[in-house]
Amino acid sequence: MHMRTTAALVVALVLSAPLSLSASMAHDLTGKASWYSLPGNKMANGQIFNPSRISVAHKTLPLGTNVCITNLDNGITVRNIPVTDRGPYIKGRVFDASKALARKLGFIPAGTAHVKGWVC
């Protein structure tokens, strides 16, 4: 096989590979989460925020992406959480959870939790 043909084959394989988040992106989803409750406000996805619905805000993940989040302080995991909004805007935080999600993850009283998140 000629060098030019091999290079073209490699390029074709790379371009046809499905897009996925790298392992380094998973690392970026580990950190501190907080919760917020701004009922009636419009979210980045255009819908009205309802704190009793499970949802999460993230700075860069595409809206509509489903994430799984584990509270590293107590081991509780919630799966298939839709990214519906942008944030958090406080340095060092990776997620802003709806009040319903924070309740399920068990960090309402504390206000924040150390979490690990991943696209699921």
Image (cartoon, helix red, strand yellow):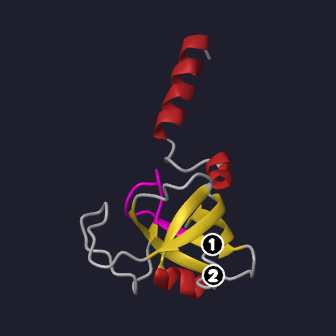
Give residue 64's position: percent from left, percent from top: 38, 64
**Magenta region, main secondary structure:** loop
Q: CA distance from mark 2 to mark 1?
A: 6 Å
Residue type at mark 1? Thr
Residue at the disc numbered 2: 107
Check disc 2: other Cα within 10 Å, few if <14, some if 14-19, many if 20+: many
**In the rendered view, does 81 fall on the left or right side of 48?**
right
Indicate whether 14 appears above or below 57. above
Q: Do the CB atoms of the residues marked 2 and 1 lie less than 8 Å apart?
A: yes
Indicate whether 52 appears above or below 23. below
* Quadrant showing the C terminus: bottom right
Indicate which disc residue 112 carries.
1
Indicate whether 90 appears above or below 8. below
Give residue 69's position: percent from left, percent from top: 61, 71
Residue type at mark 2? Phe
Residue range in magenta is 57-67
Q: Secondary structure at mark 2?
A: loop
Q: Residue at x 24, y 64 (%)?
A: 46
- The magenta stretch spans residue 25: no
Give residue 53's position: percent from left, percent from top: 39, 84
Check disc 1: other Cα within 10 Å, few if <14, some if 14-19, many if 20+: some
